[in-house]
Amino acid sequence: QVQLVESGGGLAQPGGSLRLSCVASKSGLGAYSIGWFRQVPGKEREGVSCISGTDDSIFYADSVKGRFTISRDNAKNTVYLQMNSLKSEDTAVYLCNFFSVLLGNFWGQGTQVTVSS
């Protein structure tokens, strides 16, 4: 029902920055909770950051708090993740997610972020 297209992944040096974008195929998704997860082979998927569609409250994982910033632009049907002060530990496949209690989860295809000197 909802197609999510991610961009912005790639290679960065430690201390560098990347900005991930995720564009939804539908408008009017402001009521969805939106966020970013990341996956490393052999480890559980980790919630990185989310914005509630109900009250706009924001969650950050402790590992990224103070370095990453999530934002949404409802007019552009887009969620962003600004990643600063990148560390090698941030290397992962990053997945965009839109969630509705009524309609469920929608996931992007995943984009690789690699942080290496």
Image (cartoon, grey):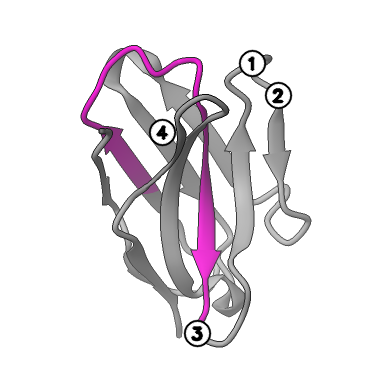
Q: CA distance from mark 2 to mark 4?
A: 14 Å
Q: Residues within 10 Å of mark 3 (few under 14, many from 20)?
A: few
Please say if 64 is above or below 86: above
Q: Which residue is mark 4?
A: 79
Dots 2 and 3: beta carbons under 8 Å? no
SS class, disc 4 = strand
| Label 2 crowd (10 A; few <14 / some 14-19 / many >=20) | few
Q: Residue at x 73, y 62 (%)?
A: 63
- The answer to if 23 sits in the magenta stretch is yes
Q: Which mark is residue 57?
A: 2
In this view, the mark in front (3 or 4): 3
Which disc number belongs to residue 41?
3
Q: Which residues are magenta?
A: 20-40
Residue contact at pointers 3 and 1, CB within 8 angstroms? no
Q: Position of residue 92 (x, y in %)?
A: 47, 73
Figure quadrant of the C terminus? bottom left
Q: CA distance from mark 2 to mark 3?
A: 30 Å
Contact? badges 1 and 4 (CB < 8 Å): no
Return the disc, 3 or 1, that comes first in the chain's sequence.
3
Contact check, label 1 and label 2, Cβ < 8 Å: yes
Q: Earlier in the sequence, mark 3 or mark 4?
A: 3
Amino acid type shown at disc 4: Val
Q: Is residue 42 left or right of residue 3?
A: right
Secondary structure of residue under mark 2: loop
Residue 38 magenta-highlighted: yes
Residues at discs 3 and 4 in contact (Cβ within 8 Å): no
Q: Position of residue 18 (x, y in %)?
A: 40, 55
Which residue, given by chain and number where applicable, does mark 1 sit on? Answer: 54
